Amino acid sequence: METMLQGLVIIGGLTFSLATSLLIEELIFGQIVRTAFARRAETPQPTSANKRH
């Protein structure tokens, strides 16, 4: 029983550590990642109706 409790404490600590590190990473680098992967403004492509043959 004590071993199972120790395992739960270890798993809980690892989970909490991972969640905290992901939160900190998102707060620090989240804006940088969002701007790096943001969609570029699309330029309007000429349609066939606008072209003269």
Image: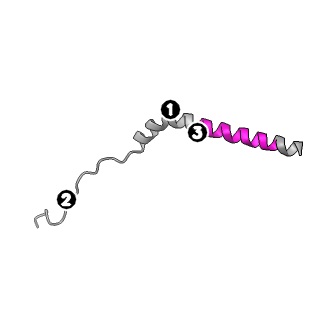
Return the residue at label 3.
22
Magenta part mainly helix, strand or loop? helix
Residue closest to the far left: 52
What residue appears at the point 56 percent right and 33 percent down from the top-left corner?
24
Foreground: disc 2 or disc 3: 3
Amino acid, disc 2: Pro
Q: Distance between the residues labelled 2 and 3?
A: 44 Å
Please name the residue shown 48% across and 38% down the image. 30
Locate residue 23, reporting x and y percent: 56, 37
Q: Residue at x 83, y 40 (%)?
A: 6
Eyeballing the image, is 12 above or below 42? above
* Amino acid type of the residue that numbered disc 3 sits on in the rendered structure: Leu
How many other residues sit within 10 Å of disc 1, few (<14), some (14-19) or many (≥20)? few
Magenta region, residue range: 7-21
Q: How far apart are marks 1 and 3 (CA)?
A: 10 Å
User: N-terminal of the two: label 2 or label 1?
Assistant: 1
